[in-house]
Amino acid sequence: MYIRAEYEKRDELKYISHLELMNTFRRTFRRANLPVAYSQGYNPHIIFSMSQPLPVGMVGHQEYFDLELKEKISLNKMQKKINQKLPVGLKILDIVQIHEKEKSLQAIVNTARYKYKMSIKKEVDQKKILKDFLDENEIEITRFRRNKDDRLIDLAPMIYSGRVLKDDLWEFTISTGSSGNVRPQEVIRALKIKTNGLVKEIPLVNIERLGMYVREEGKLYKPVNKQVLKKEVKEN
Amino acid sequence: MNVRDKIYDRLIEVSNPERYIGNEYNIIKKEWDSNKIKVLTAFPDAYEIGMSHLGLKIIYHLLNKEDNIICERTFSPWPDLEDLLRKEDLPIFSLESGKSVDEFDILAFTLQYEMSYTNILTILDLAGVNYYSEKRHEDDPLIIGGGSIISNIEPVVPFFDLIFVGEAEEHIVDIINNYSNLKAKGYSKKEILKKLSKQPGVYIPSLYEVNYDRQGHIENIIPKDNEVKTKIKRQLVSNLDEAFYPEDFLVPYMDIVHDRATVEVSRGCTKGCRFCSAGITYRPVRERKKETLLKQIDNILDSTGYDEISLTSLSTVDHSQIEPLVKELTQKYEGRKISISLSSLRVDKFSVELAKEVQKVRKTGLTFAPEAGTKRLRNVINKGVSESNLYEAVEAAFNEGWSTVKLYFMIGLPTERKEDLEGIISMVNNVLQKGKEIRKQNKKKMRPIRINVSISTFIPKASTPFQWEPMVNRTDLKQKINFLRSKLNKKGINFSWNEEDLSLLESIFSRGDRRLSEVLISAYNKGARFDGWGDFFDFDLWLESFKENDLDPDFYLRRREFVETLPWDHIDMGLNSKFLKNEYDKALKNETTSDCRFAKCKGCNICYNLDVDLDIIGNDYNVYKS
């Protein structure tokens, strides 16, 4: 049996890395006594995969993982069992069963939405700044890459939408994953350039990932949504 | 006040912020109640080292088991966090409640490694208290210490109000309660310490006076008044099987050094290696029963979710029920993919067979410690291992499919000659050769043979038969390392060694006296931190600190006279006063002393003096009875 779970990672746990998070889940599954499946070989591991990593320091409100189980177990019961054994700061919000041939999270998740606690010079019209920014045909920015040369990229086609929720609290929906990835801080850096420093850079902890989505024909679906689960799970 | 909240979002600026968040699964957060006694345990090293330390886990859970005690944790902040705290003018905080040291009644340090001494000062400094016990205020928390290097901690005792000598499980709660009661009755700290000094194992450094002669040798160490005991006797747990052991271990997020569940199968070792400090400070051997261990392991795995269990002790393979224990564990846990690891292997075939049994699930490296290169020198140090033991062990290992083995040797040992170093080289080469032959014959694919040779420097330690020996000098040490390095620099051999200057410094403090506390403070003020971590270590800074305080490092590295008063003479390990000297004399005659577990009593007298029995569970051994 394969399942896909939606969870949140918040509070202190925003400071644990992706690898540490994976270990935390693995240990939690064992504490919860789930019938997890193991890989073969010298170093057997729980068969388990996650969506795009959250950077250290960033809260995630709707994150996802897939897990294989050796036997069938009620989804409700499983959610309860895992939540009882998770540390404070991690919580499973939803679990659905998926087909074993379902495409991986990394393959389908292509969009993410972030909330930004902004730092903007006072007495400016923030909505106007955003509108001007989104109207740009080209938003060029230098991407710094570890062990590789810097590269010039255009963010414009990868920023799908933005909103000013209230002053200094913004939201952007941007492309993520292998088919075009925007790092959440790059949007701020681009804004800083476009506004000549009216918009200031902010630390990573000021950004939260609100959700991760599959974007199809302009519409956003959660990875647990029936619309994106292409294969029917046979009941037996 | 929660100090951590003030910099909570700025933790993103420091490396590994997960060191400071607490919140681990199984963390104990008790309500802050003014009627409770608050104890902050402090481990003077990084989180990932401290959280791997069994003693700290035992104390944390033992104290929190008490309804009237709140026990929290703190570790040395990494220099980047230290800088941030200083910049923001904030004190060091606990991981549980984020509170500062002044909100606690007691600050309790784990003392486990000489090279973490400066980190004690970081914590005291960031706690806002004076380093010296005698200069602290009446309302400062009581600052206490204890741990595995108790055989000589004189260089740091001026920083402590109270030291506990030995295994604390059966006494620590009493001491804490008594302190709290006496304080509530309005006694001064001085009066309280004097009263506490009467409890077993309690060492109040300020009640002892150390007098030096004109050459700087210790003349005597005497109690300041005649109500104070002249010697502090090491305490230990007489029945390990019934002793407290935690089962709801904290589960760190960080990839810590020993990231696994741990059970302590036995405590103490009587093999009698003459360089080994733990071999004396944890004597005699006390075992836990197989049934007790099985139950503990079950509970720990359930409560933590770990997929690895380590059977730990000073010599796990010697546990009298190790075979049936391992057999039952593998049967029980193979299906759950839980692997078992043995913390220390003997150099023999039996160990490899056991290792093979436990590593059915996951295969990890094998380590053997022949320690010296010739039979003569191994006799000197009483390491009862023969070359054929080693070759049998590694052959068995290669035949079982291990392609990598690690070999530990020591250099700078008493009486060491060139042929002893050549012996190391030929043993390593022979092991490599045997590996290659077996690999050639092996039909199944086997990775290229790899021998990891790890060379450590012998450091004479207090309360061992070699406590009078001089430390090898720097030039010789460098030469020895260079010689081995050049001869073992070949394909298939990976050579590693201890930083020479770091070994010298450790040696100074291992046999140091109270005057060195001044050197520690000078070095700390010059920026010494985390000295045991090679990346921060600066020997020149230390040399300057010695000079500033008019102390000569060579004075501490020299040979000690048998008639000399040693800085740790007032700490009673329970030994017969002649035992160490006899062992030393035997060493020089290349004579060995067999393990009292398997042969008759060797007269160290610890069982008698400390009123404890060698406690071997599967009992057809010759047990010493007083």
Image (spheres, rainbow, N blue to C red):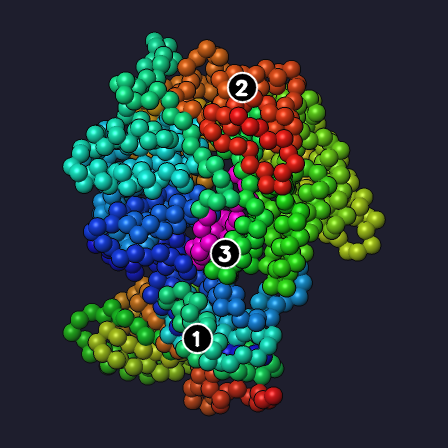
Helix, strand or loop at mark 3: helix
Using the image as rendered, state which of residue B436 and residue B141 is in the foreground. B141
Q: Quadrant of residue B285?
A: top right
Q: Residue at x 63, y 67 (%)?
A: A39
Q: Amino acid at mark 1?
A: Lys
Chain letter of mark 3 equals: B
Helix, strand or loop at mark 2: helix
Q: Position of residue B567 (x, y in %)?
A: 40, 20
- Which class describes the residues within 10 Å of circle 3: few (<14), some (14-19), or many (20+)? many
Chain letter of mark 1 equals: A
Q: Amino acid at mark 3?
A: Ile
Helix, strand or loop at mark 1: helix
Q: Are marks 1 and 2 on the same chain?
A: no
- Real-space CA distance between mark 2 and mark 3, rounded to the nearest whole angstrom: 40 Å
Q: Are marks 1 and 3 on the same chain?
A: no
Q: What residue is shown with label 3?
A: B300
Using the image as rendered, state which of residue B274 and residue B181 is in the foreground. B181
